[in-house]
Amino acid sequence: MQSLSRRRFTLGLAAASLAATSGFALSLRPGTRAVIVGGGPAGAEAALALRAAHPAASVLLVERDPTRLAREEGGASAPFLRPRAAAGLAALKAAGVELVLDDVTGIDWSGGRLALFSGRNLDFDRLLLAPGTAARDEAIPGLDAAARHAWPAAWGSEREARRLMARLQALPERGHVVLRLPAGEAAHPAAAVARALALASHVASRPGARLTVLDGTPDHRLARAFAAAVPAWPRDRFEWVTADRGGLVRAVDARRGLLETDAGAIRADVVNFVPRLEAGAIARAAGLADDSGWCPCDDSGRSHLRADATVLGDARKEALRTVAGAVHSARLATGALA
């Protein structure tokens, strides 16, 4: 990956400065090709904003998952699906946004070219990345591919969401469900609480069933938010164990349904094992993530590691990691770069 030319770099800084100080945004010239990578809430919002502001420019959205922009509801598994963009495939097409179903494997910044998984190349004049999040290896003994299949995260995968739902529907009376939340700062705090509540509703429908949340963080804010939102269910059937109380998972045996924690061994019938997250693969491959796994950026999404890169949505280091936060990041970035 090569560095941006001095001329293009200077123009980019000028555009950002004008937008920040005077509210004026440098217009995309007719025929300019703006490419957004990632079709989640941030990427879709950015594509629509750029297209509305610059109808004479070409706006392309690259998304690897053809179901991501579908508007179909997830049925019973809906609580375990990733957030979708407010604008679906039809709305993007109606706005004149071009769609490319492919995955980005590399970025040539100075040449203005993306390498795609299909082997094709895609040229760009302006590039915005909304790479989302990906699982980070935690080196937990026993957490292999078989364990991840048996204990689906259902955190961005529709297939895993359906598998988790099937396991919950087969939960026996007096069964035990475990939600594991990773160590480190919660990547999606609102989503973590929503996930716990969704699992709790299934547990409440099974006589004698229990839910245990193993929270790898020492912060009690998620536990308090969960407790405040739980309806008048028997509280002895729901337990939230933070890291300071033994909630860290040290090893697993999915075949036997065992999790070894600092508080001892726990046996479960259904496990929703949410991995530790970091910025999506293309952000890391492009050198936009630091040692934390996230992308340090300013408020407009401009990368602190590459001045010519703009990152939207959850991959940013200081992101709120909510749908509203993702959409807000897209509006800030398109205002600065438009």
Image (cartoon, grey):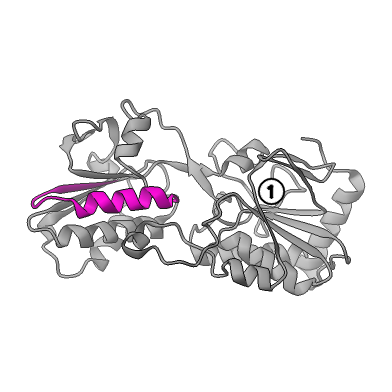
Q: Position of residue 262 (x, y in %)?
A: 23, 33
Quadrant position of residue 137: top left
Residue 96, relative to residue 65: is it above or below? below
Q: Position of residue 37 (x, y in %)?
A: 66, 52
Quadrant position of residue 196: bottom left
Q: Position of residue 278 (x, y in %)?
A: 51, 43
Q: Residue furthest top?
A: 141
Q: Which residues are magenta?
A: 154-179
- The residue nearer to you, when weighing 69 against 25, is 69
Residue 129, relative to residue 76: is it above or below? above
| Label 1 crowd (10 A; few <14 / some 14-19 / many >=20) | many
- The residue nearer to you, when weighing 208 against 15, is 208
What amino acid does circle 1 point to? Ser
Q: Position of residue 25 (x, y in %)?
A: 81, 69
Can residue 320 be seen in the rendering of this structure? yes
Left or right, 49 with respect to 166, comes to right
- Screen quadrant of the N terminus: top right
Left or right, 266 with respect to 325, comes to left
Q: Which residue is mark 1?
A: 303
Left or right, 163 with respect to 308, comes to left
Report if residue 130 lies within the magenta region.
Answer: no
- The residue nearer to you, when weighing 216 against 66, is 66
Residue sitting at 79 percent across and 44 percent down? 113
Left or right, 37 with respect to 161, comes to right
- Screen quadrant of the C terminus: bottom right
Q: Secondary structure at mark 1?
A: loop
Residue sitting at 85 percent across and 59 percent down? 14
Q: Residue furthest right?
A: 7
Report if residue 166 lies within the magenta region.
Answer: yes
Residue sitting at 39 percent across and 41 percent down? 275
| Total marks in image | 1
Can residue 289 be seen in the rendering of this structure? no
